[in-house]
Amino acid sequence: MAYKICEIMVALAFAILGGGVCFIAGGFETGNFPDPVTARGLPYLAGGFMALAGTVLVMRRLVAWLKLQGETLVADGSTEFRESFTSWGRAAASMVIALVWSLWFKRLGILVSTPPVMLALLWMMGMRSPARLFSISLGFTLGLTVIFLVFLRVNVPLGPLARFGYLFGLPA
């Protein structure tokens, strides 16, 4: 059993942390570097999302608790299905996959390293349809590539495919 106050305090701390990130980002120097997001953009977006998400979680909990009596709730983290990883196993495997991706990224490039990583992560989340696995992995990779290379003009590694980048007007 989990106490209601503990659950709401975690959500509230998340919202406060997001507000703190936005506050700290306000002191960042913008500089002269031509950055489409600016030095403050990403912290503002991430902190704002954290503050909004934490506030929404607090509000949802308060509304749900009006229906429940007592001081405790049924705790999350109960026994999972036998055919799936445990929660800590998924988290650890995700971190290992992210580490492998970071090691592959510069050498193999975004277009080669990201699809297998996405396949593995989607598989761990329980997606088993081959058509959905491949379409989401490739769609995510192409979308991410277009956003960074075309719209934001960020030079991400293309790895062995870099020699074909000139066909699309991409930097080598």
Image: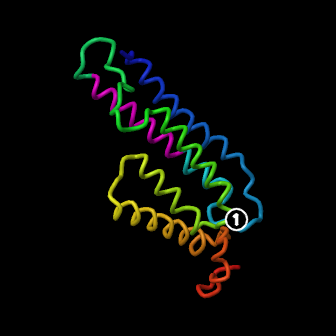
| Figure quadrant of residue 2 | top left
Rendered residue at 61%/55% (across/down): 101
| Figure quadrant of residue 52 | top left
For numbered disc 1, what is the local secondary structure? helix
Q: Is residue 123 magenta?
A: no
Where's residue 73, x and y in %? 32, 18
Where's residue 172, x and y in %? 70, 79
For the N terminus, which image quadrant?
top left
62, above or below 118, in the image? above
> What is the crowding at mark 1: few (fewer than 14 residues within 10 Å), some, or many (at least 20)?
some
Q: Residue most toward the bottom?
A: 167
Asked if residue 134 lies left or right of residue 146, the reply is left
Q: Residue most toward the front?
A: 83
4, above or below 40, in the image? above
Where's residue 129, x and y in %? 32, 58
139, above or below 5, in the image? below
Q: Residue most toward the right?
A: 32
Q: Main secondary structure of the magenta part?
A: helix
Asked if residue 36 lies left or right of residue 56, the reply is right
Q: Is residue 56 magenta?
A: yes
| Residue range (magenta) | 48-65
Of residue 128 and residue 171, the one placed in the foreground of this image is 128
Rendered residue at 70%/65% (across/down): 107
* Amino acid type of the residue that numbered disc 1 sits on in the rendered structure: Arg
Rendered residue at 36%/52% (across/down): 127
110, above or below 167, in the image? above
What is the basis of the colouring in this image?
rainbow
- The residue that disc 1 covers is 107
Of residue 33 and residue 68, the one placed in the foreground of this image is 68
